Image: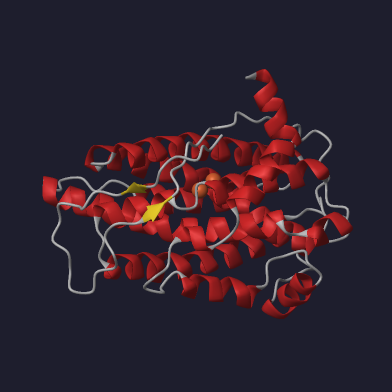
Amino acid sequence: MPRSTPVAALAVPALAVPALAAPAARVHESLVLEPRDVRFDWARLPLHWIPDEPMATHVINVLHLLLPEGERWFVKVFKEALPLIRDEQLREEVLGFIGQEAIHAEAHQEVLDHLLGQGLDPRPYVRQVSWLFQRVLGDKPGLTPAQRRENVIERVAFVAAIEHFTAFLGNWALNSPGLDRAKADPTMLDLLRWHGAEEVEHRSVAFDLMVHLDPGYLRRVRGMALSGPLLVHLWVRGARFLLAADPTLQGRLKPSWREAGRIARRGLLPDPIRSIRSGLRYLRPGYHPTQEGSSSQALGYLATSPAARAAAAHG
Ligand SMILES: [Fe+2]
Ligand SMILES: [Fe+2]
């Protein structure tokens, strides 16, 4: 559990600071991140786990398509960044982040396996996601040490921008009574809220790591400029894929922004306009992830989450 300790200022990085630099030292409450080894039983999960809401179900299901590959890639990038860290507190936070993301990836992988058992084969889409993370965003052979360092920092900036969205989505999941009203499956709700709460809990780690390695504002902008549009593209493609692959729909349902907006107004999806605005907030010079979401709400959920409580009991 997080403890309240004196604030930690991040070390000034060795790299030259560009003219458009944001403040180099970010000061925030230090964290102790605890990986919670949760288990979920999907045996009784219906295909449309928000009853009679296949569109909302599959738009959220895109998480399960993206996160196993994506979060394994986060873990890989952060392990590569470990030797570059010159601040012990940040290093501990990065290790905690790695532990949490590794468990998230496996939890969502189990949902993918369940979808396959229900006749919805996610593998063609997952292969594309895997190609993206492992080939396009993966290791580049033959780099000099300086190029390699640059490549790692660039990928950390990419993770930091995505983590802005995972915290945004986590915060939404923790504040989504519409899903309860619609009688969404309680186990899936617990997965979304447990994961969402941990995303809120560790929301500053990737950003602080990026600033530690390069405080330049341009690095932050580039991370968002690349990852924001890519994430939207992957989400739209993923929703289309799932709706087309759903054996009970047989391609009858097509996703549209207008329909997504209508579903969001009923509280079953994050509002698309708010999501884009949130991405723009990341570009404000004084931005820090702790300005978004509530750590105490996240920890409050983790104290009551059935999966997190069971994990704590099994220690
Ligand atoms: Fe995660
Ligand atoms: Fe995360």
Colour mapping used in the image: secondary structure
Q: Is residue 171 above or below residue 308?
A: below
Q: Is residue 225 above or below residue 27?
A: below
Q: Quadrant of the N terminus?
A: top right
Q: At x 61% / y 53%, what residue is drawn?
A: 63
Q: Quadrant of residue 103?
A: top right
Q: At x 72% / y 59%, what residue is drawn?
A: 175
Q: Along the horizontal axis of the image, is 121 left or right of 216?
A: right
Q: At x 81% / y 70%, what residue is drawn?
A: 266
Q: Along the horizontal axis of the image, is 40 left or right of 289?
A: right
Q: Residue furthest bottom?
A: 258
Q: Position of residue 128 (x, y in %)?
A: 49, 53
Task: Work out whether residue 32 or residue 222 is closer to the camera in this orientation and state it.
Answer: 32
Task: Work out whether residue 167 or residue 238 is closer to the camera in this orientation and state it.
Answer: 167
Is residue 137 in sight in this rendering? Answer: no
Q: Residue furthest top?
A: 314
Q: Quadrant of the C terminus?
A: top right
Q: Position of residue 112 (x, y in %)?
A: 65, 42
Q: Is residue 30 above or below residue 286?
A: above
Number of on-image labels: 0
Q: Is residue 252 above or below residue 126?
A: below
Q: Position of residue 252 (x, y in %)?
A: 79, 68
Q: Quadrant of residue 244?
A: bottom right
Q: Position of residue 173 (x, y in %)?
A: 69, 55
Q: Quadrant of residue 181?
A: bottom right
Q: Along the horizontal axis of the image, is 212 left or right of 305?
A: left
